[in-house]
Amino acid sequence: MPKLTIDDRTIEVPAGTTVIQAAEKLGIYIPRYCYHPGLSIAGSCRMCLVEVEKAPKLQIACYTFVTDGMVVRTTTEKVTIARQAILEFLLANHPLDCPVCDQAGECKLQEFYMQFGQYDSTLLENKLKKHKAMPIGPHIMLDSERCILCSRCVRFVDEVTKTHELGIFNRGDHSELLPVKGVTVDNAYSGCLADVCPVGALTDRDFRFKVRVWYLDKTESVCHGCARGCNIEIHSNRRRTHHNDGRLIARLKPRFNGEVNHHWMCDTGRYSYKSIESDDRLVQPLVRLTGKGQEKSDWTLALAQIDEQVTHQVGRSGVAAAAVIATPALSNEELWAARGLFLQGMKIEKIAHRCTPDPNGVEDSLLRKTDTFPNSFGANLIIGQPHTADPTVDTILEAAAAGKIKTMFVIGGGLLERYSTDLLREKLRNVETLIAIQTHRSVLTEMATVALPMTSFAEMDGSICNFEGRVQRYNQAMPPVGQSRPLLDTLADLANRWELKTAPRQPENCFAELAQNAGYFAGLSYETLGDGGVNPSRRSATAATT
Amino acid sequence: MNAGLEIGVAVGKTIFIIMFALSLGGLLTWVERKQSAVMQDRIGANRASILGLRVWGLFHIIADAVKMFTKEDFVPNTPHKFIHAIAPVLSIFFALLSFAVIPFGSSIVIAGHSIGLQVADVNVGILFIFAMMSVAVYGVVLAGWSSNNNYALLGGIRATAQMISYEITFGLTLVGVILIFQTLSMQEIVRAQGGLLFGFLPRWGVFLQPLGLLLFMTAAIAETKRIPFDIPEGESEIIGFFVEYSSMKFGMFMFADFIEQILVAAMVTTFFFGGWQVPYLGDTGFAFPWGTTWDLNTWMVESLRVAAFVVKVSFFCWLQMLIRWTLPRFRFDQLMNLGWKVLLPLSLANTLATAVIVLWVGR
Amino acid sequence: MGTVRVIHVSERRRTLTFWERTYLLEVFRGLVLTARHFFVNLWRHSLWLVGVKSGPPGAATFQYPEVRRPQSPRLRTLHRLAKRPDGTPRCVACMMCETVCPAFCIKIVAEEVDDSSIEKRPKSFDIDIGRCVFCGFCVEACPEDAIRMDTGITEIGALSRDGMVLNIETLLSLPPKSERGDKPVDFLQQQLVQ
Amino acid sequence: MLKLATRNIGLENSHTLAVARANGAYSRLEKALAMAPEAIVEDVIKSNLRGLGGAGFPAGRKWSFLPKDSPKPRYLVVNGDEGEPGTVKDKYIMIHDPHLLIEGIIITCYAIRSHKAFIYIRGEYDLPIERMERAIAEAKDAGILGERVMGRDFALDIVVHRGAGAYICGEETSLLESLEGKRGWPRLKPPFPAVEGYQRCPTVVNNVETLSYVPFVIEMGGQAFADLGCERNGGLRMYSISGRVNKPGIYELPMGTPLRQIIYDYAGGITDGRRLKAVIPGGSSCPILTADEIDVPMDFDSLAKIGSMLGSAGIIVFDETVSLPEALLVLTRFYAHESCGQCTPCREGTAWMAKIIQRIIDGLGRPGDADNLIRVARNVLGNTICPLGDAAAMPVMSWVTKFRPEFEEWIRRGRPVSESPVPVTRIGERLERAAV
């Protein structure tokens, strides 16, 4: 392990580490543009120049590998002048677009210029004109003038997606980032281009002009788009509610997790946030009174109706004719509470979570998974395994179609992606008391005796298990939409009405109870899950080998 | 002279003095605004106009009156509605009543009848005026009490304390005047100031009782509750007894203030500045110390004397305005300190000294 | 420039001399001062009244609204939005003013515009004058010199709180004082028309 | 006068195998093939043969850097890109004596145990490409190249690769990129080509001229070759001299020949007997020398000592009638145009300098411009991936520093220097004013 000194501080790092990485370990941030830890090294921006003792010239920290006894200085006058010079060069042809540029506020050019720049410009020359505001794909807008030719994006499409849509054309200061002729940048991960771009050359068309980034609040969360469970940040706009068309969630950004998604996320997941505040959210309880149509209602009446109708129905047709569908779109806590109420409390044996695989599911070697449910693994653990009956959604729907099910709870979303509206309408026709606890309006809420709105993942704390079994937690990013309530509260209210044991209403406490009772989660808590989550199956595997 | 004529003359004199007080009081509302403006490099009220005529804002008097009469007369929720209504009347009534004993001239002879230019030549005029001014405090106290408002009540109590404190000084200074002129009649006091001191100086109270004047002015201003002694009112911050008054009832309090101001000016004139006396003017004309004489007929003399009275009163009104717009308000403790610890001892000393001198000179 | 003289509090609270404490003389001095003002001003008023207007006036008063106080060119008055030569707003909805505004009185909603040399423009631009503290930060912050406080309008009134919210059309329609000259803008009237 | 590489130039049909063989070609190869490869490398090291493409790195040392135990194939890449303004030597070798080069390539390949060599020739060199291809075909037919070189158990294939005409492709790593079919962008170093070059295999990249001297090293022996030159600069080299001299051309002279001698004795002095103003000693990217500095011996070390470079020995002579700011504009525009655009300082700096000089020439100069030029150049210098940034910055720095009054005058007056005794040629007038 080479030992080196950076700015008079010594650190020992593994061989093959670069100076920029070693400095980062010491908390010394060396400015960079072309260097991206998820991509190969280009060494072209020259921003990370540092002084290495015994080297005749300044060295780029991103491509200087540490050697034993190396002495690096990052704040000398030579380095300062070089950084100022590089920034001056980068800005020589950079347009004064900050007012209209979406990157402003998270732009590395702005940041480094404020930090390292030389404030008095000597540039008198005219700037070059290049292409502006070119939509190069469904999600990405290119502004070549703003490009500093760091080639991160080119390396991203070459190395990560391997789709090779982008290239740098022409020479010298006429060099320009452009898509290859006749190609649109529409790969499944194109949104990441806006993330890797350190300046405003590649921006997200979806986010375009919606909110200024400095108004955004960040919440750590986990993508619910598929079983991968990519770590994300929810960027919400709570401070200027008139921006972003009045919606709270402005965008999703990937959050680095070396075990799950590295720096990336797919476009499907990235733009999935739109459903959270979409117009078809169920925002109010709906109740169908006998002899009348479905009406908008309030929580007290709706809960009383469930109490009455379900008690009546179960009393008449028996528990055997009752069934629950709890989809794997629910969090571990919600599934645990549902299990407690329905399986242990009400003794409903027919509680299902497993659906037929998604016929449209896509999977690739990078991130995307066929299973579009975020918590199939957890549902299987909590509802499936300890429970001998373990029916699938299909068997329950068949039983319902055959008239064997009179009372049914349908909890959680995602069913509509697997089953067509017509099919569900057909299968559920004979169910007399249908209780739907849903985030969105659908055929389920339409047919429901009582439909209750529940919160989506952005409005609630919780944890899910990805396809590998990694338990990851997500946090509430916004208040519940409309009158929707957390499912844990709804289930606890129902349990109270039926004088059954309730699961804790606080997700954190509920998870603690789950950890005590389900072996897989043993010893875990929200605290130990941390930002990146824990994979208990891997933990036990490593424990077995050592 | 028959009784009917006597009543007619009395009514005439009463109307004259009331009109004088009221019109001067009205004018003072304008003077107050204009004088303060001129003192403060401003212009002052000048917007009220009739047919585009502005006459330096004189129409504001009318405008104010119209406003006072037409504003909503808000009566607070109080069990003493009658007292609440009567309080401002009391205030203004006693202030006006005091003018009865103020001599505004010597006397004129019409058709052989000598008519004294004074509504009532009471031989205890000083005591009368003193009594009236003391009773005036009722208006204030009753207003504060009947308003059913803590702030008004506090204002009334402050007013009582202040008026009682300063009344003593007020009375004691006048004792000095009584001692010197040896009479309680106002007309007599004025006549006594007709001679000359040392052959050239008018024998006015100011020269005989300089300290008395100072103390009297101070106490009198305190009695009128005007700045710097406006603790009972303190419109701008501490508010006072008339906080629950509006419309013309409030107007009456305000007007009573101005009337009292004129009254104080008249008293100062009468006691210390020779009342209607014009220096060197005798009943037949001027007789200057250097021997020159200038004969005038009786009418001329009497007119000059009434004019002199009006001028003197006007001057002291102006002076009070000047004081009111110059000095800041006393704090309540300062007010009490001044009254009890400074003015009272000084006035006692003044009385004693006067008595000793009068005794000594008399012997 | 001279040095700054530090006045100590103790220095200001010096003890009064005997004559000052007797108060009488000070009262008299005060009266002399105010009386002098009174008579000097009365004299000047009189001179003006008889038509001698060469001397200083007796009062510093401006007979508003007939006479208006001259405005400093730097005076911060009602905002306006500057226009490009083609009449479109210069504002590109960068939100700098909205961000810097300490009173949170600016609300901008951005929209995209086809012209790739502009890209962004305000869809709506509201200033709640009722909240504005006239600090001028928005003008300082504006990178496009689009928001300016040079209308010279200081009389701002409306009959409701909503009336105090100026929208983009109003802000664009206001002329700078340099163009308007001294012609007063009946601002309230404009609001009422809306 | 001793001639080595230029020995056959001037003979009729010197490019044909027959003529070449008759004049000694491939005789050295026989000798070399009889030697052990290590001995050849040893001999070349001893010969002090330097890399004559411009960098001056000892050729033998470069060969010895190839990893001994790598299982990967090794390659020899011949750099015939010759893009440096003022340099025309490789062209003449390839046109007139291609077999000399082929002989050098074969010996080198034998010495470094390479079985494939590429000759990367710049795109504009039609005739050299044609001659090289023909010569290789001839050599193949004659059994000199191919599976069995000269009948020995040594296979060698030579491929002629035509570049597309980018100055940057003369830089060895971008040349390799170009050779691999990619955009000609320099690579980050290390690894050097000797370790990871063409297709990430050990590769030696040598200039045409360097390899052309290899047969003579074999012929004369390393020491004898070294003795021809001066200390640490062995043998001869070809000086291309251009500009305001009476006899411009290529002169093969020993290393260390004084510059004054080259200009006045060999090139016949300055045109029309004018005064010498300045000399670029080794291709346009080398810092300029004033008329007082021309007594310097023309070898790598001596020139480095006075702050310039021998480079590719492309001597450009300016007489007193040349307007240096305009000449510098030509140079900087060339570098701005040829900058590959990969790294920031070079991409933006070269263009910026060109813009400033263009502005000065246009009469819009500002008082601080000269200092700013030097500052920009200094900021480019040493901060780039490849030496192109340095190549662009060094002339600007040295020209503006050494001839500052002329620049200042132009900045101040907005037009050429007035005191010149003879009319100054306005180079700018002949330049098309395309945007830089």
Image: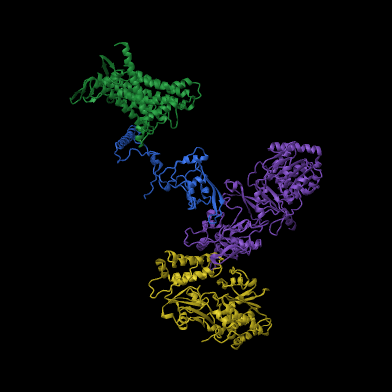
Where is residue B147 shown, x and y percent of the image? 48, 24
Q: Residue at x 61, y 75 (%)?
A: D161
Residue B180: which quarter of the image? top left
Question: Of residues A18 and A193, which is closer to you in this image?
Answer: A193
Q: Is residue B311 visible?
A: yes
Q: Nearer the viewer, residue B170 or A271?
A: A271
Left or right: D167 as drawn, with respect to A510: left
Dividing the picture into quadrants, the one containing residue D167 is bottom right
Quick check: B112 left or right of C165? Answer: left
As rendered, which of D123 and D67 lies closer to the eye? D123
What is the image's colouring? by chain
Whether residue A436 is visible here, answered yes or no, is no
Chain identifier matching the blue colour in the rendered picture: C
Image height of D400 relative to B116, above or below: below
Label tally: 0
Residue placed furthest toward the bottom: D22
The picture quadrant where one finds residue A258 is: bottom right
Q: Residue furthest left?
A: B291
The chain that appears purple in the image is A
Residue B262: x and y in percent read 35, 25
Q: Position of residue D234 (x, y in %)?
A: 54, 81
Q: At which x and y percent is residue D135? A: 62, 82
Residue A163 lies left or right of residue D410; in this view the side is: right
In-front residue for pair C159/B303: C159
User: Looking at the image, which residue is at 35% across and 18% down?
Assistant: B128
In the image, which lettered chain appears green?
B
Colour in which the image shows chain D: yellow
